[in-house]
Image (cartoon, rainbow, N blue to C red):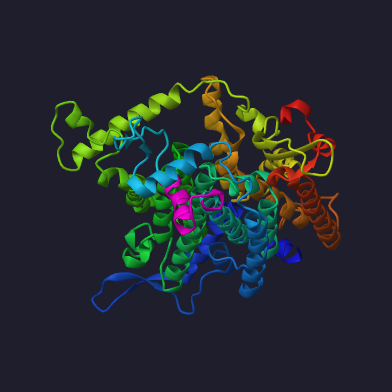
Amino acid sequence: MIDAIEADEREQDATGPRGGTRGVTATLTRLRDRFRRAPNDQGEFTVAPAAGAVVPEDVRRRLDPAIPGRRWVAWVSALVITAIAALLRIVNLGFPPGRIFDEEYYATEGEELLHHMVEWRPDPDPNLPGYGDYVVHPPLGKWMIAAGIKLFQYDSFGWRFSSVVVGVASVLMIIRIARRMFRSNVLGCTAGLLMAMDGMHLVLSRTAILDIFVMFWVLAAFGFLVLDRDARRKRWLRAMEKGLDPTDPSRSGRPRLGWSGVPWWRLAAAASAGAACGVKWSGAFFIPAFLILIVIWEVGARRSAGVTRPWRDTLIDESGWIVAFVVLVFGAYLATWTGWFISPDGWKRHWLNSMGQEEPFIFGALRNLWEYHREIYAFHAQLDDSHQYQSWPWQWLLLARPVAFYYNADPNCGAASCSAEILLLGTPVLWWSFIPALLGVAWFGISRRDWRALPIWLMFAVGILPWFYYELKHRTMFYFYIIPAEPFLILAVVFVLGALISGPGVGRTRTFALPADDRRLYGTIFAGGYVLLVGLCFWWYYPLYVGWSIPYEDWLRHLLLGNRWV
């Protein structure tokens, strides 16, 4: 993890808010010294670089910090970890052979979409064809399940295959996202290993229910925004290298508009956010967080460049793109309902006609969809039925109430009494470290003014806080609702591991601090030991994640919280 240390220190100096707020006056002075107003042939004054002008090195580091290590090494290590994750998830995927837990709904509805374009309910009369079914979740997640059924067949392997694909893809994504955020190959791979060895992620990656797809699209949207952040900062750097004076308050002091100024990664994030909503409405919780990050990161880029009025310029330059982001989210969400639009059989598809009213082209279909959404909202607002495995948000990080997806007591283990269970339970060592990790992110983020603390905390907060509101409404909830926030909890752990290795940060000394070499050594040993401990814990609980039949006494020893885990 030595490269993680050096990368962390460079990043702290290069891209953190400390670098963007401290010394702004000095940066502006240097920039003014390097740029001048020069008349052109027509006597008009334009911004031109002074003779021999270059972008100040500290500004360059803030706008385009280097990622250490060879790219091919980073890709090879990422793919190896991804292959391990794939192996863990694909082996014996068809077991158990029947539908478990909510696969009863989603696997069935995925098959129905392939045949009818909408969820379908057979008529009790076998002589009648049936009709479009009323369901309470958008169709995209079920279409993704249907893709696996189409590729293989309608069996347990087929309807779970798409969950494996997005689960494995999310491991690769978090490796690349962490590498880019922390400027470290090692920390990126650490994030991937932790996700690959998380029991909750493993079980959901092997089960055909919707929440793993919400997590996938949320993580994809976040990753695209991280790419957008780097791309926009590089855009400023390229413009300054060509002579742009960021201290000029006029339009000339900002990069040119045009094709190169289109934030393509941001638009991809918007489409992904819309897709998350198209799996479950809970994906919408993350949209305000994405908009906040866009604004904060755009302001930060301008501060790093030396812009005199970063908030004003951000409002002027980015308002249109923020509106486009919201519009594209809405458009992507509507696109997930394509099957409902083109089929005449969807639930409420012709509600206006059934009420004796006209259905104008396009607007009539949208009005009918709105009526359908009103019914869906009413269902969710009144969902307070008790369930054996329901839990409250404050219990989720504590693993106070996991969910049993499957249990079989048949004696297949060679002992007199056996238990085979698939238990939705996060790897305990990993999940019980999330709370101190979040506290560590807050501490290091504030003390170092580290830009990475805000997105980690913000994404976690919007992944869990809205559910506390529904707790007040006594809505039925389950532990797996937290899965979209899990990648950011893992990033919190990686953040703290990197901080423990790198010490107090550049320019910050402590009388009790260890020498740099000792700090790196002890920090690396601690981080390695922690990852090893997570791996051992994952190995210990693996039989309960995949349904192995083990002696009842062994099964009982795994239940650390007793009846709360039964």
Magenta region includes residue 146: yes
Image position of 1 with respect to 407: above or below:
below
Q: Where is residue 344 in the image (x, y as percent from the top left)?
A: 24, 41
Quadrant of the snapshot with the N terminus: bottom right
Q: Position of residue 434 (x, y in %)?
A: 70, 41
Which segment is the magenta one?
140-158
Q: Position of residue 410 (x, y in %)?
A: 74, 37
Residue 550 located left or right of residue 299: right
Q: Where is residue 33 in the image (x, y as percent from the top left)?
A: 49, 68
* Residue 361, picture quadrant: top left
Residue 53 located left or right of residue 68: left
Which residue lies at the image location 16% right of the left edge and 36% below the top edge?
A: 359
Quadrant of the snapshot with the C terminus: top right
Q: How many labels does the image show?
A: 0
Magenta region includes residue 39: no
Task: Specify the principal SS of the magenta part.
Answer: helix
Residue 296 located left or right of residue 408: left
Towards the viewer: 454 or 249: 454
Which residue lies at the image location 37% right of the left edge and 52% below the top edge?
A: 318
